[in-house]
Image (spheres, rainbow, N blue to C red):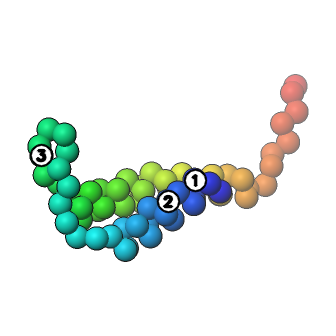
Amino acid sequence: MPYVSVALVLTSRFLTREDGTVTDPAGQPWQLADLGETTMLVSVFTMYFVALLSTLLVGRPRQDRTLV
C-alpha cells in the first residue's frame, strides 16, 4: 500500500504543479512542467503497473503446493 500512496502523491503534485524554471548545478535550466510530466510518466508506467500487478497476484486463489 505505501507504493500506491507514493504514486498518488506524485499524481497530486502533477495536478497542482507550479509553472516556472529551475536551474541545476551545471547551469542547465529545466521547465517544471517538463519535470512534472516526466515524473508522471514514470509513475504511471512503473508504480501503478506494479501496484496493479501485485493486487492481482495477491487476490488470486492460492494453488496447493505439495511436494511430491
Question: 15 above or below 57?
Answer: below
User: Which circle, 3 or 1, is nearer the viewer?
Assistant: 3
| Residue 20: image location, x then y, percent | 19, 66
Q: Which mark is residue 7?
A: 2
Question: 68 above or below 13?
Answer: above
Q: How many marks?
A: 3
Q: Secondary structure at mark 3?
A: loop
Q: Nearer the viewer, residue 38 or 52?
A: 38
Q: Is residue 48 left or right of residue 61?
A: left
Q: Are marks 2 and 1 in contact (CB under 8 Å)?
A: yes
Q: Nearer the viewer, residue 66 or 60?
A: 60
Cα separation between marks 2 and 1: 6 Å
Q: Which residue is mark 3?
A: 28
Q: Is residue 7 left or right of residue 56?
A: left
| Residue 64: image location, x then y, percent | 85, 42
The image quarter containing residue 2 is bottom right
User: Which circle, 3 or 2, is nearer the viewer?
Assistant: 3
Q: Which residue shows up at 12% across the image and 46% down it? A: 28
Circle nearer the N terminus (3, 1)? 1
Q: Label 1 amino acid?
A: Tyr
Q: Which mark is residue 44?
A: none
Q: Secondary structure at mark 1?
A: helix
Circle nearer the N terminus (3, 2)? 2
Q: Is residue 45 left or right of residue 66?
A: left
Q: Are marks 3 and 1 in contact (CB under 8 Å)?
A: no
Q: Label 3 amino acid?
A: Gln
Q: Which residue shows up at 11% across the image and 43% down it? A: 27
Q: Which mark is residue 3?
A: 1
